[in-house]
Amino acid sequence: MKLVEGISQDGITPEVTRPDPGKVVSGDPVHSTWSREDRDGLYCGMWQTTPGKWRISYAEWEYIYIHSGHSILTDQHGTVTHLKAGDRFIIRPGFDGTWDCVETTLKDYVIVE
C-alpha cells in the first residue's frame, strides 16, 4: 500500500447504485462511486450522481469538494445550499433533507463514521 496516493477515477471500476426507491422524490438518479479508502470508519474517493432528487439522512461526518455539476441540498428546515464546481463543504451528522442533482455532479468525498 502506498502511503501517499492521488485520488482519481483511473484504474478503478466504479460501483454503480441507485438510492432506495422509497427515498426517491423525482427522477432516476444513478450513483457511481470510485472508492480509494474503505477501512476503520474512514471512506474516501470520488462519487458522481446523475439528475434526480432523493431524501438523505447523515449519521456520519463528510467533507466534499465539487469538481463539476450542480446539486442542491435542502435541510429539514428548508435551508438551501447550492453545490457547484470548486465548492467545498462539510456535512455534519444529523443533517436530514434532500439531495437534488440538477446537473450531473462529481465530487471528492471523505467520510468519517
Image (cartoon, rainbow, N blue to C red):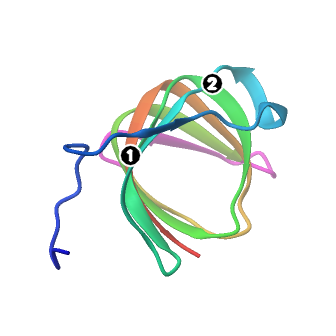
Residue wearing tag 1: 107
Residue at the extreme top of the image, as rendered: 27
Viewer-proximal residue among 16 and 62: 16
Rendered view: 108 above or below 50: below
Amino acid type at circle 2 is: Gly
Find the distance from the CA under tag 1 to the CA under tag 2: 16 Å
- Residue that appears at 68% across and 37% down: 19
- The tag earlier along the polypeptide, 1 or 2, is 2
The picture places residue 85, in percent across and down from the top left corner, at 33, 39
Q: Secondary structure at mark 2?
A: strand
The picture places residue 30, in percent across and down from the top left corner, at 55, 28
Q: Secondary structure at mark 1?
A: strand
The magenta span reads 75-87
Residue wearing tag 2: 52
- Number of marks present in the image shown: 2
- Residue that appears at 80% across and 51% down: 76
Q: Does residue 106 belong to the magenta stretch? A: no
